Image: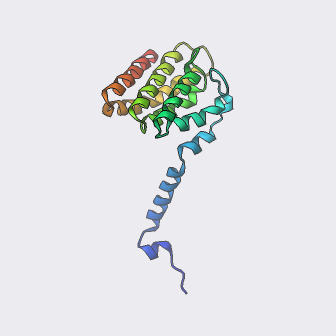
Amino acid sequence: MARTSLAANYGISRLSIRVRTLYGMVMAQALWMRLREEHWNEYAVSRGSAERLPKILQDLASRKRARSMKACHEVWSMLCRNGIHSAAVITVPYLVEILDISIEDVQIEIADTLKCCAMGASKVDADWQVRLVSSLRSVVPEVERLAQRAPSDVRNQLNDFLGAMGLFK
């Protein structure tokens, strides 16, 4: 029996197969997989260990309202209670990613946490403050995009975050 290629069998070009494979590899990088790759033990939170944050961020992304709302409060508490903490540096981009897929109540809470991070970053006198400001600046275009199509309550909270980012100009 002659051996034929996948491209010949299904009438797809090799380039198309390569693109689909690369796209699949990118899509395979699910949130939980990327969270596991971070070095959470190198960052501080208000209490406990930052190593709990990946699980809490997964809960935040949950479609179950009670679970995601509880996670909102835990994230805020870990990052913002008694001043801003260094784990915000790597958490901010994940918060914006989760913001895009969350229900309105959760979006409002995430926007409040982002605003807290922005306002707190201006008061931090630590070596990681520059990285936090950079992390916050990197998400501004995405937050602006999300604010344009967000319900009014969410838009107001996102605009408060964007206003707080004015502290760094």
Name the residue at the bottom extreme: 1
Find residue 143 and report its horizontal and vertical position in percent: 40, 30
Q: Residue at x 49, y 61 (%)?
A: 18
Find residue 99 and report its horizontal and vertical position in percent: 44, 34
Along the viewing direction, whichever of 36 and 162 lies nearer the viewer:
36
Q: Residue at x 59, y 37 (%)?
A: 55
Quarter the C terminus occupies = top left
Seen in the picture, residue 129 relative to 18 is either above or below; the reply is above
Find residue 39 and report its horizontal and vertical position in percent: 66, 35
Find residue 7 and report its horizontal and vertical position in percent: 46, 72
Q: Residue at x 39, y 20 (%)?
A: 160
Seen in the picture, residue 106 relative to 7 is either above or below; the reply is above
User: How was the colour assigned to the protein in this rendering?
Assistant: rainbow
Quarter the N terminus occupies = bottom right
Seen in the picture, residue 165 relative to 42 is either above or below; the reply is above
Number of numbered labels in the structure image: 0
Along the viewing direction, whichever of 56 and 64 lies nearer the viewer:
64
Q: Residue at x 53, y 43 (%)?
A: 31
